[in-house]
Image (cartoon, rainbow, N blue to C red):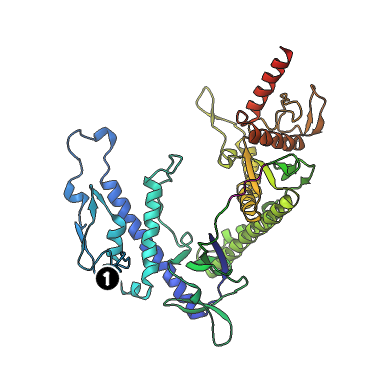
Amino acid sequence: MLLKYKYKLKPQKSQTVIIANWLELARKQYNYRLAERLNWFEATRTPVNACPLNVSVVPVERIYQNIPEFRIQARDGRKKDGNGNPVTKKGDRHPNIINGYVVWETVQLADLVQTKKLFPEYKSMHSQVLQDVIQRVQTTMDNFTKPDKNGKTSGRPKFKGKHYYNSFSYPQLSNTNIVKNANGRYCINLPKIGLVPFVYNRAIPGGFKVKTGTVIREADGWYISLTIEDKTVPIEVAEIQPTLENSKGIDLGLFYYAVTSDGEFINVPKFFRKSEHRLSRLQVRLAKKQKHSKAWKVLKGKIAKLHQLIARQRLDWQFKLAYHLFSDCQVIFLEELQIASLVRRCKAKLGNNGQFLPNGQSAKSGLNKSLQDAAFGKFVQVLEYVAWKLGKRIIKVDPKGTSQHCWECLSKVPKSLSERWHSCPKCGQELDRDYNSALLIQKIGLLSTQREDITSVKTAVRASLAEESRVVA
């Protein structure tokens, strides 16, 4: 099992200077190595409309320029075979080009020696911290060039500005790095930086070993995130059979943040909206200051801390709500919301004369701000984590039709977004529309776990009509 524990660092002034300097050097190295990869990537690509059938437009000499064909191993490898001998030995030749593709991670790792000769300031950095920068570039390019399980790739990698590269990692730390200094204060021993005091507010659980550490810059100072592991603890997913008694359905929305199938209505906290006026005043003051002046930097720090406060308030509230919702049930049914689709801009409308017509984007922008303030995607992640931690279960259902059908008879009752009351003409159900949706989500979730042919409201309605026709026949 892998866990992450985050602690606040309290470095001395000299240590703060070293950490900030390392972070800037890591950022520059990241941008340089990414530029190498992107330049080679673009140089070896040919436009589709200019691609010949028998030869490459790009000369081979240009494709493999300044890239050695082989790499000579400088020392014995750490991995051992069954007899205790190293798997790879000093002097072994390893190809840098395999099937026409450059093994860029290996090439750039080997080039770090030359980097330290040309730029002596990199000698002050720990070697593994510098190597981790190369691995980050490799991960970024893999996400760009290789599709995931859904067949999608990320966008073209971007170069990192000073405010967008905020961490560096030690790939190998251990429990022995957490020590007490001469004054009895807890410190973490970071190689080439020294003993850095930190707030050890949560002890490492017994049996867990520290694997890696990531130093992170945030608005209110420096933090370290420790990855800890205990291989003896299995990662188990609770297999609880949901029933009407041990489960509840939840409908998420902006009129009420959450409405449960047992009749609980939870109001929207609106953390960003409540701090929006204060934030706007700070931004107005910032716009009047000279850029990069001392007063400008002070205001930038205040704005960043306010954003951090809003995010922390929201996350703390979501965790408390998640534990509250699981306090009296074992299974929660939830809509599988597509957040990216919910906050998408309205499509443009064109008139006969080619001019743009009003498309309601102004009102949609306000709705999008409220959706992002509610942070439903983050809340679902929190619910999943709390469910795993408590040994309980989250089941997602198809959201289509959950607000337009009656939970009792499954008949369709069309409603606009402004209509907040559900009134079914067929069975006579009269209740709040969000409460009706929560009951329907629970009903569909229970049916989907009991019958394979029911996966959504649509299939449930179809099955209900089939059963009615059989009864009539």
**Rendered image quadrant of residue 461:** top right
Residue 464: in sight, yes or no?
A: yes
Closer-to-camera residue (466/323):
466
Residue 28: in sight, yes or no?
A: no
Compared across the picture, whether 21 is left or right of 466 comes to: left
Please name the residue shown 64% across and 34% down the image. Answer: 448
Q: Position of residue 288 (x, y in %)?
A: 58, 60
Please name the residue shown 38% across and 50% down the image. Answer: 142
Closer-to-camera residue (17/415):
415
Instruction: Say which element carries label 1.
Output: helix
Closer-to-camera residue (111/335):
335
Residue tagged by mark 1?
A: 118
Q: Position of residue 390 (x, y in %)?
A: 66, 55
* Majority secondary structure in the magenta region: loop
Closer-to-camera residue (138/355):
138
Q: Is residue 176 above or below residue 213?
A: below
Q: Is residue 37 above or below residue 353?
A: below
**Rendered image quadrant of residue 450:** top right
Other residues around mark 1 within 10 Å, as few (<14) / some (14–19) / many (≥20): few
Q: Position of residue 338 (x, y in %)?
A: 58, 39
Please name the residue shown 65% across and 43% down the image. Answer: 366
Q: Is residue 443 magenta?
A: no
Extreme residue in the top direction: 473
**Rendered image quadrant of residue 86:** bottom left
Q: Position of residue 389 (x, y in %)?
A: 63, 56
Type of the residue with mark 1: Leu
Segment colored magenta: 237-241
